[in-house]
Image: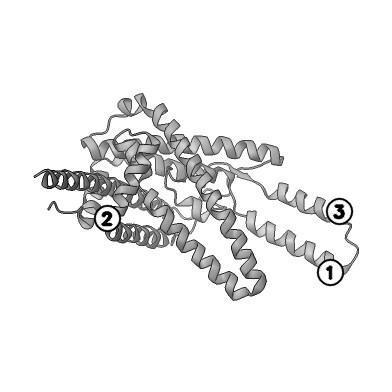
Amino acid sequence: MPAPPSLMGSLMAGFDATANHIGLLLLPVSLDLLLWFGPHLRLDQLIQRMVTDMRDQAGVSNREMADLMQFSNQFWSILVERLNFFSILRTYPVGIPSLMVTSQPLTTPLGEPASWQVPSLGVAALLWILFTLIGLGLGAFYFGMIAQVIATEKLSVPQILTGWLKTTKRTILLALLLVIFMVALSVPASCLISLAAMGALPLGQIGLWIFAGIALWILLPFAFAPHGVFLYQSRVLISLRDSIRITRATMAKTVLFFIILLVLDEGLSILWQIPGEDSWLALVGLFGHAFIATGLIAASFVYYRDANRWLQRLIQQSAFLSSA
């Protein structure tokens, strides 16, 4: 029987490919520099106006309502204090990894960056759609570079650009399908959790954890959905089918592989964020995160390629034995 894909071999091959093609780090580093030194697009004044309008329309006449409105105002102020609307450029499931999206810096070694305010909810909605499309397009180019390096051990930007529009369309379609699937999954589950919470709070919390576990278990077979699009130029539905087949055939090893990726990414992200946002040493963490994140994504492509080959050989041997 053919040997299944190797976890350590995939990780080593992914980091080797990244080290041999440092150009793969250009987009992650550029996005982090934009979110750090570039102008910040903020929503704090818009949220402040919305809270004030809600308070005026409610006609606050007693102390309890005033305290409630004040608490709501403070809550939204804290929530959007560090929010940079440009962070929407970091998209999922295909996107450019970013360290600054999690930290949302307010200052730089050169001082506070320029700040722009979003004037209205309509403009915010339009910018959200625009930045999401741009992020998916840049993510498609970034994933295309990694897939080309894994498939050919070479990096050719003109060759990637020739098929970039097609892969971007498929990336947008894949993101829409996953959003629709998540909405369809979350609506009935949220109703059940709400009913359980109405009866007893512990039941609601238990239901939330159960829903999270079920959601992860259901979404896991789609983890390699983008890989077939970029590595084999497959259509979205075909890539989804292949991802389900590979994940089911290697369930235990695939779960362990993604746990390793998550631990490495999150654990090292804590290390990269040790320098303050106003220190030039944060540049070291920025480049370190870009290298690790790119290496992990490259390792997932190697694992997917090897798992697909292993599954195909397994199917061929099974068909041969059946015919014999």
Q: Is residue 165 visible?
A: yes
Mark 3 residue element: helix
Q: Mark 3 touching mark 1, by CB under 8 A? A: no
Residue of label 2: 250
State if disc 2 and disc 1 touch (CB < 8 Å).
no
Numbered marks: total: 3
Looking at this rendering, what residue extends furthest in the front direction? 323
What SS does tag 2 mark? loop
Instruction: Identify which residue is drawn at 22% across, 47% down.
Output: 311
Say which label, 1 or 2, has the lower sequence index: 1
Q: Are marks 3 and 2 in contact (CB under 8 Å)?
A: no
- Alpha carbon separation for disc pair 1 and 2: 57 Å
Q: Position of residue 77 (x, y in %)?
A: 68, 57
The residue at the far left in this view is 324
Give the camera-side residue of 167 and 247.
247
Residue that badge 1 annotates? 64
Alpha-carbon span between mark 3 and mark 1: 15 Å
Amino acid on which disc 2 is placed: Thr
Going 74% across and 64% down the picture, which residue do you hit? 71
Q: Residue at x 48, y 41 (%)?
A: 177
- Residue of label 3: 56
Q: Residues within 10 Å of mark 1 (few under 14, many from 20)?
A: few
Q: Nearer the viewer, residue 242 or 166?
A: 242
Relative to 150, is 56 on the left or the right? right
Q: Earlier in the sequence, mark 3 or mark 1?
A: 3
Type of the residue with mark 1: Glu
Residue 25 in view: no
Helix, strand or loop at mark 1: helix
Q: Position of residue 186 (x, y in %)?
A: 55, 55
Between the residue at mark 3 and the residue at mark 2, the CA separation in whole angstroms equals 58 Å
